[in-house]
Amino acid sequence: MNVASLHRYPVKGLSPEPLSKVELVAGRFFPGDRILAFENGPSSFDPAHPAYQSKTRFLMLMKNARLAEIASRYDDEGHMLALSHRGSVQVRGDVRTSEGRMALETFLQDFCAGETRGPVRLLQAPDGFRFTDSIRSGFVSILNLASVRDLESRMGGLLDPLRFRANIAVEGWEPWVEEDLPGQRIRIGGAELRVLKTIDRCLATHVDPHTGVRDRDVVGALQDSYGRITCGVYASVKLGGTVALGDVLHIQV
């Protein structure tokens, strides 16, 4: 059992960034994950008093499938976010400045024309907060690749694991072993995590992560095949440490 891939999603609803290793910190979220979000009309989000907001308040794949056509890259040091479409950078902006934010917001307002409820506004997560779908449990998301393959066999045709937008993908587990992990601890590389809950899947998984086409009924297949819509788990970091590609996973007994 080992780490097959690591991804962060700096912007909620936009593309993943692959990593070779990451430093997990006890009690903290996955580094650089969901630190930005584009508000889809007024959401009442207050950065001085951050509180969980429904995913429907933001641009996201479940409602805005075209977002999958955009490749986003975020530079932590320069605070620069670049958005590309069909291999060409369309806009780049410093998320700390009004000019940078406005350029990014205007591009997405136009790109998602007809799908927005109001002005698109870039939001930054204050320290200790993230724009996750489950703020109480969405610290680190883990996907079992064997479970994805089992679902593939029932649906017919390949399923890209990126549909599930996980931070850590695991190879070597039996299919669906993760369904029994909530409450247990797992060691990954130098870190120790406690599995909190399984992840309910939504219509974002129906969208091809590269083309933006809604082409597979993943939620329906989960329900029809297993009588549930869960795939993957959320975990919290109990002991910080480095996690790298190829690191072995151990379920603590």
Image (tube, rainbow, N blue to C red):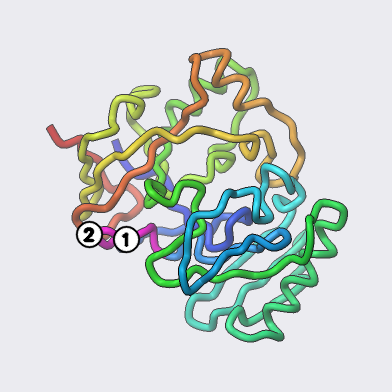
Circle 2 Cα neighbour tier, 10 Å, few/some/many (<14 / 14–19 / ≥20): some
Q: Is residue 180 left or right of residue 49?
A: left
**In front: label 2 or label 1:** 1
Residue 171 in magenta?
A: no
Query: Which is nearer the eye, 246 or 198?
Result: 198
In which image quadrant can residue 207 be found? Answer: top right
For label 1, the residue is: 28
Left or right, 2 with respect to 250, comes to: right
Tell me residue 193's x, y (percent). 25, 47
Which quarter of the image is occupied by the C terminus? Answer: top left
* Residue 58 quadrant: bottom right
Q: What kind of residue is marked 1? A: Arg
Give the farthest residue toward the left: 253
Mark 1, other Cα within 10 Å: few <14 / some 14–19 / many ≥20: some
Q: Where 71 falls versus 141 (above or below)?
A: below
Q: Amino acid at mark 2?
A: Gly
Q: Mark 2 or 1 closer to N-term?
A: 1
Residue at 65 percent of width and 70 percent of height: 122
Examine the rendered structure and indicate whether residue 211 appears above or below residue 94: above
Observer-nearest of 158 and 92: 92
Left or right side of 94 for 26 = left
Residue name at image x 69 percent, y 46 percent:
210
| Label 2 with label 1: CB-CB less than 8 Å | yes
Q: Position of residue 95 (x, y in %)?
A: 60, 78
Q: Quadrant of the N terminus?
A: top left
Q: Provide the residue designation for mark 2.
A: 240
Residue pictured at 47% horizontal, 28% vertical:
230
Main secondary structure found in the magenta portion: loop
Number of disc labels: 2
Q: Which residues are magenta?
A: 25-31
Give how far across and how far down residue 251 sits, in percent.
20, 35
